[in-house]
Amino acid sequence: MIPMVDLKRQYRTIKAEIDAAVGDVLTGAQFILGPNVTALEEEVAAYHGVPCAIGVASGTDALLLALNACGVGEGDEVITTPFTFIATAEVASLLKAKPVFIDIRPDTFNMDPALVEAKITKKTKAIVPVHLFGHPADMDPLLELAARYNLKIIEDCAQAFGAVYKGRKIGTMGDCGAFSFFPSKNLAGYGDGGMIITKDEQLAATIRILRNHGSEKRYYHKMIGYNSRLDEIQAAIIRVKLKRIDAYNEGRRANARAYCAAIKAADVVLPVEAEGCRHVYHQFTLKVKNRDRLQQVLQEKGIASAVYYPVPLHRQEAFGGMSDIVLPHAEACAAQVLSLPMFPELTAEEILMISDAINHA
Ligand SMILES: *Cc1c(COP(=O)(O)O)cnc(C)c1O
């Protein structure tokens, strides 16, 4: 079976370094907010050329704490995309704000900025663009709207560490960038983890307090916060992989090029890279009308594939009562997308075999 992602293959190539890093944490016995979290925060901030990075417990918490620190709360509206993992919008609801879903562009799968202004109201507080599958969202028009209407922008960077939009790294353009280190992400630990980056020292200070039960000084609590710290063992693991992230992303890009050269099936729409964007292919996602049949054919040949995402968020039971909303591109993509195996260590032979199976399906 060719899996969607093979973490064992990657581990074999970095085992000595990972094992030593984890061993050092165990020997040092500083497990919560220790030296590896501090070092990783500095390294991720330096990678992005921003002053602040704050490690938290997950990508979901990165979004939650960022929205909270940006002042999103009861009665506010948060503009976002319906074609994403639920966490993107779930956090708005957790803060008693309302997610407002904007349709996507059928080529990049990202929020269509041309549709945003019509949905801005007096209650709108923030926009949460998602750099889905590793492709940067179209940020310039969103930044312009945010400046004009005084809105916050929190970038959901969970799938796109290292992606670039018109010369700027994703996560550095809005008020905050929220990253996930969930094991299958393109930069990942071996468990849950997340990080927020920001240029705003004030915002960073608030997030640091929020992640640690609202306290700066132990047992003195300024506000109601969370227990949401990045784990020291995860930080040690992620540091080993951060050194290689550009090479890993280059590997994904090379694999995407190989897929695009080899897949010839007329009914398949290949992923695009918009002008000025550096896609990091967290996922390699096709559109195909006869999606379920293609998935069946691949399955029979021992090739994994996956549907991200089968139900757009405005159709989810959890956000009940949105049955009047119609977002045609999100709904069409949900019915047609199919993601193929994608990870840096995928071999040329495997890509040819998968492409061949698609071409003859
Ligand atoms: C994975 C993911 C998240 C949540 O990250 P976790 O670390 O799993 O909490 C949020 N948004 C998107 C787009 C994701 O893919």
Image (cartoon, rainbow, N blue to C red):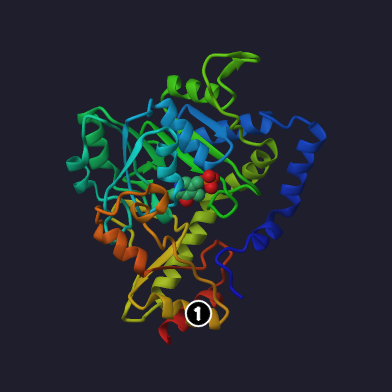
The residue sitting at 61% across, 75% down in the picture is 1
The residue sitting at 25% across, 60% down in the picture is 328
Residue 170 placement (x, y as % from top left):
40, 43
Q: Is 268 above or below relative to 87? A: below
Residue 78 placement (x, y as % from top left):
32, 37
Residue 292 placement (x, y as % from top left):
42, 76
Amino acid type at image mark 1:
Leu
The residue sitting at 59% across, 24% down in the picture is 212
Q: Is 16 above or below relative to 343? A: above
Q: Residue furthest left?
A: 118
The residue wearing badge 1 is: 298
Q: Of 85 and 253, which appears nearest the observer?
A: 85
Q: Residue furthest front?
A: 321
- Mark 1 CB within 8 Å of ligand 1: no
How many residues crowd mark 1 within 10 Å: few (<14), some (14–19), many (20+)?
some
Figure disc tally = 1
Quadrant of image for the C terminus:
bottom left
Quadrant in which residue 208 is drawn: top right
Q: Of 52 and 361, which appears nearest the observer?
A: 361
- 330 left or right of 8? left
Q: Is residue 99 visible?
A: yes
The residue sitting at 33% across, 57% down in the picture is 109
- 240 left or right of 51? right
Q: Residue furthest bottom?
A: 360
